[in-house]
Image: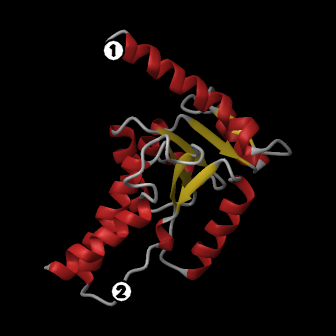
Amino acid sequence: MKYKLLILFSFLISVVPNIGFSQEQQVEKKIRVYFSAKVSKPQYQKFNSGVREKIFNENYQVFMPQSLFIPELEFETIEKCAYEADKAAIDWSDIVFLLSPYGKDCAWEIGYAKGKNKFIIGFLSDKESIGDSMVIGSLHLAITDDPEVMSILAKDDRTKDKCLFLGEESFDNLVMPFYNRECHLREILQANGG
């Protein structure tokens, strides 16, 4: 049991690197991102890393579940540790970033993030993912770099008012105005007891 707790604790420390430090002690406030994507195969992990490098700059602290070190343990212990670490990372995050095509674990992460009132961005690069109503309905923004997917998103009632094309403009310039506006609206609601 102690071994399991130590492993879980190490996961949580890797998820929240500034644990134990006050806001004043942190050098600069970066936007914390939970990167939700398929991770079960090396080609997924390579693709995820490429997207991360392309999109996120030094203004973001990105947690990628594929970066967790999982020692040799029985399967159910590994699953429990990964679940707890991912859940803690979503709690820690400011933004949840979903990369398509995604699987059922990612769909659960989006549902959990929605319940926690996180700002959720879907990077959609395939037409099949657009058909998932519960996930698509949970997104604050749907972004793509595929003109055909953009055309579909722009015509879909669920996404037409929240879809953006990631072309020459940077992710920061494209997405941050929407994120900042959402944060400002939340502050106003909280100040008014809502």
Where does the image place residue 3, in percent across and percent down from the top left?
Answer: 21, 82
Which label was assigned to residue 137? none
Residue 181 place in picture, x, y as percent? 59, 23
State left or right for residue 10 relative to residue 94: left
Residue that sits furthest to the right in the current view? 168
Residue type (three-letter) at the residue carrying disc 1: Gly
Q: Nearer the viewer, residue 134 or 111?
A: 111
In the picture as drawn, the residue positioned furthest to the top comes out as 192
CA separation in Å, label 1 and label 2: 44 Å
Residue at coordinates 62% horizontally, 29% vertically from top-left? 178
Task: Give the residue pinned by disc 1.
Answer: 194
Query: In the figure, residue 104 lies in which quadrant?
Result: bottom left
Residue type, numbered disc 2: Pro
**Quarter that holds the N terminus:** bottom left
Which of the 4 image quarters holds residue 164? top right
The residue drawn where x is 62% and y is 26% is 161
Which quadrant does the C terminus fall into? top left
Residue 100's x, y, as percent? 58, 57
Q: Which residue is located at x 64 percent, y 75 percent?
A: 46
Q: Secondary structure at mark 2?
A: loop
For the residue pair 168 and 135, the one nearer the viewer reads as 168
In this rendering, is residue 68 above or below 131? below
Kindly check if marks 1 and 2 are in contact, taking CB atoms under 8 A apart as contact.
no
Q: How many residues crowd around disc 2 within 10 Å: few (fewer than 14), some, or many (20 or more)?
A: few
1 or 2: tag closer to the N-terminus = 2
Q: Position of residue 61 (x, y in %)?
A: 57, 54
Q: Residue visible at 42% across and 61% down?
A: 15
For residue 82, above or below residue 116: below
Residue 117 image-quadrant placement: top left
Instruction: Judge left or right: residue 115 versus residue 182.
Output: left
* Residue 57 left/right relative to 21: right
- Judging by the rendered image, the residue that carries numbered circle 2 is 71
